[in-house]
Protein backbone atom coordinates (compact mmCIF):
# COMPACT_ATOMS: atom_id res chain seq x y z
CA UNK A 1 0.00 0.00 0.00
CA UNK A 2 1.05 3.62 -0.51
CA UNK A 3 2.50 5.43 2.49
CA UNK A 4 0.27 7.94 4.20
CA UNK A 5 2.06 11.07 2.82
CA UNK A 6 1.15 9.99 -0.74
CA UNK A 7 -2.58 9.69 -0.08
CA UNK A 8 -3.24 13.21 -1.36
CA UNK A 9 -1.39 12.67 -4.63
CA UNK A 10 -4.48 11.25 -6.29
CA UNK A 11 -7.19 13.51 -7.69
CA UNK A 12 -9.76 14.21 -4.96
CA UNK A 13 -12.28 16.93 -4.16
CA UNK A 14 -10.96 20.16 -2.63
CA UNK A 15 -12.50 19.24 0.73
CA UNK A 16 -11.09 15.83 1.63
CA UNK A 17 -12.68 15.66 5.08
CA UNK A 18 -14.75 12.52 5.53
CA UNK A 19 -17.17 12.24 8.44
CA UNK A 20 -18.64 9.16 10.07
CA UNK A 21 -22.13 9.93 8.75
CA UNK A 22 -23.63 12.58 6.52
CA UNK A 23 -27.30 13.10 5.66
CA UNK A 24 -28.58 11.80 2.35
CA UNK A 25 -29.99 14.84 0.57
CA UNK A 26 -31.83 14.52 -2.77
CA UNK A 27 -31.55 17.48 -5.17
CA UNK A 28 -33.26 20.61 -3.86
CA UNK A 29 -35.31 20.81 -7.07
CA UNK A 30 -37.10 17.59 -6.06
CA UNK A 31 -38.18 19.16 -2.77
CA UNK A 32 -39.58 22.40 -4.18
CA UNK A 33 -42.96 20.97 -5.30
CA UNK A 34 -43.54 19.70 -1.76
CA UNK A 35 -42.77 23.12 -0.30
CA UNK A 36 -45.08 24.80 -2.81
CA UNK A 37 -47.90 22.44 -1.84
CA UNK A 38 -47.40 23.23 1.84
CA UNK A 39 -47.29 26.95 1.05
CA UNK A 40 -50.56 26.73 -0.87
CA UNK A 41 -52.34 24.61 1.74
CA UNK A 42 -51.13 26.84 4.62
CA UNK A 43 -51.12 23.69 6.82
CA UNK A 44 -47.83 23.57 8.69
CA UNK A 45 -48.48 21.12 11.54
CA UNK A 46 -51.16 19.24 13.53
CA UNK A 47 -51.46 16.16 11.35
CA UNK A 48 -51.62 17.77 7.93
CA UNK A 49 -51.75 15.99 4.56
CA UNK A 50 -48.05 15.10 4.34
CA UNK A 51 -48.04 13.89 7.96
CA UNK A 52 -50.90 11.52 7.17
CA UNK A 53 -49.32 10.41 3.91
CA UNK A 54 -45.99 9.66 5.56
CA UNK A 55 -47.52 7.63 8.38
CA UNK A 56 -49.35 5.49 5.84
CA UNK A 57 -46.35 5.17 3.51
CA UNK A 58 -44.00 4.18 6.33
CA UNK A 59 -46.42 1.53 7.60
CA UNK A 60 -46.48 0.01 4.13
CA UNK A 61 -42.72 0.23 3.63
CA UNK A 62 -41.80 -1.12 7.07
CA UNK A 63 -44.46 -3.83 7.18
CA UNK A 64 -46.18 -2.56 10.32
CA UNK A 65 -49.81 -1.71 10.97
CA UNK A 66 -49.69 1.44 13.10
CA UNK A 67 -47.11 4.20 13.43
CA UNK A 68 -47.16 7.62 15.10
CA UNK A 69 -44.78 10.30 13.83
CA UNK A 70 -42.82 12.50 16.24
CA UNK A 71 -40.66 15.58 16.08
CA UNK A 72 -37.65 13.48 17.16
CA UNK A 73 -36.75 10.06 18.51
CA UNK A 74 -36.07 11.24 22.05
CA UNK A 75 -39.58 12.61 22.53
CA UNK A 76 -40.85 9.36 21.06
CA UNK A 77 -38.96 7.41 23.76
CA UNK A 78 -40.26 9.67 26.52
CA UNK A 79 -43.81 9.35 25.24
CA UNK A 80 -43.62 5.58 24.76
CA UNK A 81 -42.87 5.15 28.46
CA UNK A 82 -45.79 7.43 29.28
CA UNK A 83 -48.10 5.53 26.95
CA UNK A 84 -47.37 2.21 28.67
CA UNK A 85 -47.47 3.84 32.14
CA UNK A 86 -44.01 2.46 32.97
CA UNK A 87 -42.75 3.20 36.48
CA UNK A 88 -40.17 1.94 38.98
CA UNK A 89 -37.12 0.29 37.40
CA UNK A 90 -36.35 -0.50 33.77
CA UNK A 91 -33.58 -2.84 32.66
CA UNK A 92 -31.55 -1.37 29.81
CA UNK A 93 -28.12 -1.27 28.21
CA UNK A 94 -25.21 1.03 29.01
CA UNK A 95 -24.03 0.68 25.40
CA UNK A 96 -26.21 3.18 23.56
CA UNK A 97 -26.74 6.88 22.93
CA UNK A 98 -27.61 8.81 26.10
CA UNK A 99 -31.20 9.43 24.95
CA UNK A 100 -32.04 5.82 25.82
CA UNK A 101 -31.42 6.28 29.53
CA UNK A 102 -32.33 9.98 29.59
CA UNK A 103 -35.88 9.08 28.55
CA UNK A 104 -36.14 7.00 31.72
CA UNK A 105 -34.92 9.80 33.99
CA UNK A 106 -37.35 12.25 32.38
CA UNK A 107 -40.12 9.89 33.46
CA UNK A 108 -38.79 9.45 36.99
CA UNK A 109 -37.75 5.86 36.25
CA UNK A 110 -34.56 4.23 37.58
CA UNK A 111 -32.34 2.68 34.88
CA UNK A 112 -30.82 -0.68 35.73
CA UNK A 113 -27.85 -1.42 33.49
CA UNK A 114 -27.12 -4.95 32.28
CA UNK A 115 -24.05 -6.08 30.33
CA UNK A 116 -24.04 -6.77 26.60
CA UNK A 117 -23.45 -9.74 24.31
CA UNK A 118 -19.85 -9.70 22.97
CA UNK A 119 -20.92 -10.76 19.47
CA UNK A 120 -23.77 -8.31 18.82
CA UNK A 121 -23.07 -5.65 21.50
CA UNK A 122 -26.79 -5.76 22.26
CA UNK A 123 -28.32 -6.33 25.70
CA UNK A 124 -27.42 -9.86 26.81
CA UNK A 125 -30.61 -11.82 27.60
CA UNK A 126 -28.62 -14.24 29.79
CA UNK A 127 -27.97 -11.41 32.25
CA UNK A 128 -31.44 -9.88 32.43
CA UNK A 129 -33.11 -12.17 34.97
CA UNK A 130 -30.50 -11.54 37.64
CA UNK A 131 -31.27 -7.80 37.44
CA UNK A 132 -35.04 -8.15 37.93
CA UNK A 133 -36.42 -6.90 41.24
CA UNK A 134 -39.99 -6.37 42.54
CA UNK A 135 -39.70 -2.79 41.22
CA UNK A 136 -38.87 -3.85 37.65
CA UNK A 137 -41.68 -3.02 35.21
CA UNK A 138 -40.04 -3.10 31.77
CA UNK A 139 -37.02 -3.90 29.61
CA UNK A 140 -35.64 -1.33 27.15
CA UNK A 141 -33.19 -3.03 24.77
CA UNK A 142 -31.47 -1.30 21.83
CA UNK A 143 -30.93 -2.72 18.34
CA UNK A 144 -27.35 -1.42 18.33
CA UNK A 145 -26.10 -0.32 14.88
CA UNK A 146 -29.33 -1.82 13.51
CA UNK A 147 -28.34 -5.35 14.55
CA UNK A 148 -31.45 -7.13 15.91
CA UNK A 149 -31.56 -8.08 19.57
CA UNK A 150 -32.38 -11.64 20.58
CA UNK A 151 -36.06 -10.70 20.52
CA UNK A 152 -37.36 -14.17 21.29
CA UNK A 153 -35.24 -14.62 24.41
CA UNK A 154 -36.10 -11.14 25.66
CA UNK A 155 -39.82 -11.65 25.09
CA UNK A 156 -39.75 -14.97 26.93
CA UNK A 157 -38.24 -13.28 29.99
CA UNK A 158 -40.73 -10.43 29.76
CA UNK A 159 -43.65 -12.85 29.59
CA UNK A 160 -42.37 -14.85 32.58
CA UNK A 161 -42.12 -11.74 34.75
CA UNK A 162 -45.03 -9.73 33.28
CA UNK A 163 -42.76 -6.96 32.01
CA UNK A 164 -43.25 -4.50 29.15
CA UNK A 165 -40.66 -4.40 26.35
CA UNK A 166 -39.88 -1.10 24.63
CA UNK A 167 -37.26 -1.31 21.88
CA UNK A 168 -35.02 1.63 21.11
CA UNK A 169 -34.88 0.93 17.38
CA UNK A 170 -33.30 4.27 16.42
CA UNK A 171 -30.82 2.47 14.12
CA UNK A 172 -33.16 -0.24 12.83
CA UNK A 173 -35.14 1.37 9.99
CA UNK A 174 -36.04 -1.36 7.48
CA UNK A 175 -34.26 -4.14 9.38
CA UNK A 176 -35.87 -7.56 9.29
CA UNK A 177 -35.37 -10.68 11.36
CA UNK A 178 -36.74 -14.10 10.45
CA UNK A 179 -38.85 -12.76 7.63
CA UNK A 180 -40.55 -9.83 9.34
CA UNK A 181 -39.81 -6.32 10.50
CA UNK A 182 -37.81 -6.20 13.72
CA UNK A 183 -40.12 -3.30 14.67
CA UNK A 184 -43.02 -5.70 15.27
CA UNK A 185 -41.39 -7.10 18.41
CA UNK A 186 -42.02 -5.86 21.92
CA UNK A 187 -44.87 -3.65 23.10
CA UNK A 188 -43.53 -0.60 21.27
CA UNK A 189 -40.56 0.22 19.02
CA UNK A 190 -39.09 3.69 18.63
CA UNK A 191 -37.40 5.01 15.49
CA UNK A 192 -35.18 8.06 14.96
CA UNK A 193 -35.27 10.03 11.70
CA UNK A 194 -32.35 12.29 12.61
CA UNK A 195 -30.34 13.64 9.68
CA UNK A 196 -27.60 11.03 10.12
CA UNK A 197 -29.93 8.03 10.01
CA UNK A 198 -30.56 5.66 7.09
CA UNK A 199 -33.95 7.33 6.58
CA UNK A 200 -34.28 10.90 7.78
CA UNK A 201 -36.73 13.78 7.91
CA UNK A 202 -34.01 16.30 8.94
CA UNK A 203 -35.25 15.73 12.50
CA UNK A 204 -37.96 13.26 13.39
CA UNK A 205 -38.95 9.97 14.92
CA UNK A 206 -41.80 7.53 15.32
CA UNK A 207 -43.40 4.99 17.61
CA UNK A 208 -44.48 1.71 16.06
CA UNK A 209 -47.71 0.61 17.77
CA UNK A 210 -49.35 -2.83 17.94
CA UNK A 211 -52.96 -1.62 17.63
CA UNK A 212 -55.15 1.39 16.87
CA UNK A 213 -56.07 1.98 20.52
CA UNK A 214 -52.43 2.35 21.56
CA UNK A 215 -51.74 4.67 18.62
CA UNK A 216 -54.71 6.83 19.62
CA UNK A 217 -53.34 7.23 23.16
CA UNK A 218 -49.90 8.08 21.76
CA UNK A 219 -51.39 10.62 19.34
CA UNK A 220 -53.12 12.30 22.29
CA UNK A 221 -49.92 12.35 24.34
CA UNK A 222 -47.84 13.93 21.55
CA UNK A 223 -50.36 16.77 21.20
CA UNK A 224 -50.62 18.02 24.80
CA UNK A 225 -53.29 15.40 25.59
CA UNK A 226 -55.92 17.06 23.37
CA UNK A 227 -58.78 14.93 22.08
CA UNK A 228 -60.61 17.88 20.58
CA UNK A 229 -60.59 21.66 20.88
CA UNK A 230 -61.82 21.69 24.48
CA UNK A 231 -60.96 18.24 25.88
CA UNK A 232 -57.59 17.27 27.37
CA UNK A 233 -57.26 13.72 28.69
CA UNK A 234 -53.58 13.47 29.64
CA UNK A 235 -50.55 15.60 30.53
CA UNK A 236 -49.15 15.33 27.03
CA UNK A 237 -46.20 17.01 25.35
CA UNK A 238 -45.65 18.77 22.03
CA UNK A 239 -44.10 16.00 19.96
CA UNK A 240 -45.81 16.60 16.61
CA UNK A 241 -43.89 16.35 13.35
CA UNK A 242 -44.23 19.39 11.06
CA UNK A 243 -45.50 19.22 7.50
CA UNK A 244 -42.07 20.24 6.14
CA UNK A 245 -40.37 17.34 7.93
CA UNK A 246 -43.09 14.93 6.79
CA UNK A 247 -42.82 16.15 3.20
CA UNK A 248 -39.05 15.63 3.24
CA UNK A 249 -39.73 12.13 4.55
CA UNK A 250 -41.99 11.41 1.60
CA UNK A 251 -39.19 12.50 -0.73
CA UNK A 252 -36.57 10.49 1.16
CA UNK A 253 -38.71 7.38 0.98
CA UNK A 254 -38.36 7.45 -2.82
CA UNK A 255 -34.57 7.20 -2.46
CA UNK A 256 -34.11 4.99 0.60
CA UNK A 257 -33.81 1.66 -1.26
CA UNK A 258 -31.00 3.07 -3.39
CA UNK A 259 -29.32 4.51 -0.31
CA UNK A 260 -29.40 1.17 1.50
CA UNK A 261 -28.12 -0.64 -1.60
CA UNK A 262 -25.15 1.76 -1.77
CA UNK A 263 -24.50 1.28 1.96
CA UNK A 264 -24.37 -2.48 1.34
CA UNK A 265 -21.73 -1.98 -1.38
CA UNK A 266 -19.64 0.18 0.96
CA UNK A 267 -19.96 -2.41 3.73
CA UNK A 268 -18.76 -5.16 1.39
CA UNK A 269 -15.80 -3.09 0.20
CA UNK A 270 -14.74 -2.22 3.76
CA UNK A 271 -14.82 -5.88 4.80
CA UNK A 272 -12.82 -6.96 1.77
CA UNK A 273 -10.12 -4.31 2.21
CA UNK A 274 -9.85 -4.70 6.00
CA UNK A 275 -9.67 -8.51 5.92
CA UNK A 276 -5.86 -8.55 5.91
CA UNK A 277 -5.34 -5.80 8.51
CA UNK A 278 -4.31 -7.50 11.75
CA UNK A 279 -6.12 -6.37 14.88
CA UNK A 280 -9.08 -4.76 13.09
CA UNK A 281 -12.23 -6.82 13.61
CA UNK A 282 -15.33 -5.95 11.62
CA UNK A 283 -18.45 -6.35 13.72
CA UNK A 284 -21.18 -8.47 12.20
CA UNK A 285 -23.93 -9.00 14.72
CA UNK A 286 -26.41 -10.18 12.08
CA UNK A 287 -28.03 -13.60 12.00
CA UNK A 288 -28.37 -15.70 8.87
CA UNK A 289 -32.07 -14.79 8.58
CA UNK A 290 -31.61 -11.07 9.27
CA UNK A 291 -31.87 -8.31 6.65
CA UNK A 292 -29.59 -5.40 7.66
CA UNK A 293 -29.75 -1.73 6.70
CA UNK A 294 -25.98 -1.08 7.02
CA UNK A 295 -26.63 1.93 9.23
CA UNK A 296 -23.08 2.02 10.61
CA UNK A 297 -19.74 0.36 10.06
CA UNK A 298 -18.21 -0.37 13.48
CA UNK A 299 -14.82 -2.02 13.88
CA UNK A 300 -13.09 -3.17 17.05
CA UNK A 301 -9.42 -2.19 17.40
CA UNK A 302 -7.78 -5.11 19.17
CA UNK A 303 -4.31 -5.90 20.49
CA UNK A 304 -2.92 -7.23 17.22
CA UNK A 305 -3.21 -3.82 15.55
CA UNK A 306 -0.40 -2.30 17.57
CA UNK A 307 -2.13 1.01 18.27
CA UNK A 308 -4.91 1.78 20.68
CA UNK A 309 -8.37 2.69 19.43
CA UNK A 310 -7.81 6.30 20.50
CA UNK A 311 -4.48 6.46 18.65
CA UNK A 312 -6.15 5.21 15.46
CA UNK A 313 -9.01 7.67 15.99
CA UNK A 314 -6.49 10.52 16.10
CA UNK A 315 -4.51 9.17 13.15
CA UNK A 316 -7.66 9.18 11.02
CA UNK A 317 -8.51 12.73 12.15
CA UNK A 318 -5.00 13.84 11.21
CA UNK A 319 -5.78 12.53 7.73
CA UNK A 320 -9.14 14.34 7.51
CA UNK A 321 -11.18 11.21 8.30
CA UNK A 322 -13.58 11.83 11.17
CA UNK A 323 -14.76 8.53 12.62
CA UNK A 324 -16.66 8.20 15.88
CA UNK A 325 -16.04 6.26 19.08
CA UNK A 326 -19.66 5.16 19.18
CA UNK A 327 -20.47 4.34 22.01
CA UNK A 328 -17.87 5.93 24.25
CA UNK A 329 -18.08 6.66 27.11
CA UNK A 330 -20.75 4.24 28.26
CA UNK A 331 -23.99 5.83 29.45
CA UNK A 332 -23.25 4.36 32.87
CA UNK A 333 -20.08 6.49 33.11
CA UNK A 334 -21.85 9.86 32.90
CA UNK A 335 -22.34 11.76 36.18
CA UNK A 336 -26.10 11.29 36.42
CA UNK A 337 -25.76 7.48 36.18
CA UNK A 338 -22.40 6.39 37.58
CA UNK A 339 -23.67 6.38 41.18
CA UNK A 340 -26.14 3.61 40.41
CA UNK A 341 -25.09 0.17 41.67
CA UNK A 342 -25.71 -1.33 38.24
CA UNK A 343 -23.33 1.22 36.66
CA UNK A 344 -20.24 -0.26 38.34
CA UNK A 345 -17.63 -1.26 35.71
CA UNK A 346 -17.34 -4.67 37.38
CA UNK A 347 -21.01 -5.24 36.47
CA UNK A 348 -20.40 -4.33 32.82
CA UNK A 349 -17.11 -5.93 31.70
CA UNK A 350 -18.13 -6.65 28.10
CA UNK A 351 -19.62 -3.20 27.55
CA UNK A 352 -16.55 -1.57 29.09
CA UNK A 353 -14.25 -3.58 26.83
CA UNK A 354 -16.25 -2.79 23.68
CA UNK A 355 -16.47 0.90 24.51
CA UNK A 356 -12.68 1.09 24.64
CA UNK A 357 -12.21 -0.68 21.30
CA UNK A 358 -15.05 0.41 18.99
CA UNK A 359 -14.62 2.88 16.16
CA UNK A 360 -17.34 3.61 13.60
CA UNK A 361 -15.87 4.32 10.19
CA UNK A 362 -17.58 6.66 7.71
CA UNK A 363 -20.74 5.15 6.22
CA UNK A 364 -23.16 7.07 4.00
CA UNK A 365 -24.39 6.74 0.39
CA UNK A 366 -22.27 9.58 -1.01
CA UNK A 367 -19.07 7.87 0.18
CA UNK A 368 -17.09 6.82 -2.90
CA UNK A 369 -15.03 3.68 -3.40
CA UNK A 370 -11.98 5.94 -3.54
CA UNK A 371 -12.92 7.37 -0.12
CA UNK A 372 -13.19 3.87 1.36
CA UNK A 373 -9.86 2.84 -0.16
CA UNK A 374 -8.20 5.96 1.26
CA UNK A 375 -9.63 5.33 4.74
CA UNK A 376 -8.46 1.72 4.77
CA UNK A 377 -5.03 2.75 3.49
CA UNK A 378 -4.62 5.09 6.46
CA UNK A 379 -5.67 2.29 8.82
CA UNK A 380 -3.39 -0.32 7.21
CA UNK A 381 -0.35 1.99 6.99
CA UNK A 382 -0.91 3.02 10.62
CA UNK A 383 -0.56 -0.52 11.97
CA UNK A 384 2.52 -1.04 14.13
Image (cartoon, rainbow, N blue to C red):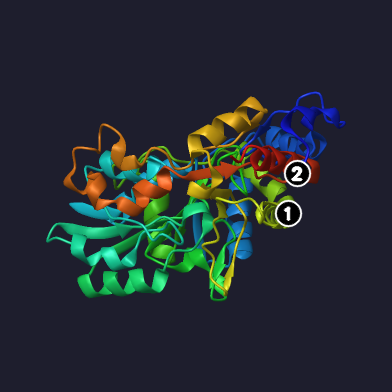
Give whichever of 225, 106 is nearer the camera: 106
Q: Is residue 209 above or below residue 18?
A: below
Q: Which quadrant does the N terminus fall into?
A: top right
What residue did someone put label 2 on?
A: 373
Q: Is residue 215 above or below residue 17?
A: below
- Asked whether residue 79 appears in the rendered view, the answer is no
- Tell me how far mark 2 sits from mark 1, CA to CA: 8 Å
Side (left or right) of 197 relative to 120? right
In x, y percent, where is residue 60? 62, 64
Q: Secondary structure at mark 2?
A: helix
In x, y percent, where is residue 110? 21, 46
Q: Quadrant of residue 17?
A: top right
In x, y percent, where is residue 193? 56, 45
Q: Residue at x 42, y 51 (%)?
A: 219
Give whichever of 213, 139 is nearer the camera: 139
Disc 2: CA contacts within 10 A as few (<14), some (14-19) or many (>=20): some
Q: Secondary structure at mark 1?
A: helix
Considering every residue shown, the one lying at the far left of the view is 134
Q: Are marks 2 and 1 in contact (CB under 8 Å)?
A: yes
Q: Which quadrant does the C terminus fall into?
A: top right
Q: Residue at x 31, y 55 (%)?
A: 115
Disc 1: CA contacts within 10 A as few (<14), some (14-19) or many (>=20): some
- Asked whether residue 178 appears in the rendered view, the answer is yes
Q: Residue at x 62, y 49 (%)?
A: 198
In x, y percent, where is residue 209? 44, 61
Give whichever of 151, 3 is nearer the camera: 3
Number of residue marks: 2
Give me the disc on residue 325: none
What residue did someone put label 1 on?
A: 269
Considering every residue shown, the one lying at the far right of the view is 11
Side (left or right) of 113 relative to 356? left
Q: Quadrant of residue 294?
A: bottom right
Amino acid sequence: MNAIPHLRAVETPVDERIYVTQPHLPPLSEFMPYLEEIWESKVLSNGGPFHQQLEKALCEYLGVEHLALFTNGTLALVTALQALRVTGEVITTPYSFVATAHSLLWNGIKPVFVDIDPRTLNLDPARIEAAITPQTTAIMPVHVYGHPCDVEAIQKIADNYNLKVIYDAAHAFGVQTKGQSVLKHGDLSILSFHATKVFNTFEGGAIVCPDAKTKQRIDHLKNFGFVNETTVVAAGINGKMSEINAAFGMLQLKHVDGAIARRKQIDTLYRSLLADVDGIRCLSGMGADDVPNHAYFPVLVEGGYGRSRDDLYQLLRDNEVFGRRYFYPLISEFPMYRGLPSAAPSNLPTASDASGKVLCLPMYPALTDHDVERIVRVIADGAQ
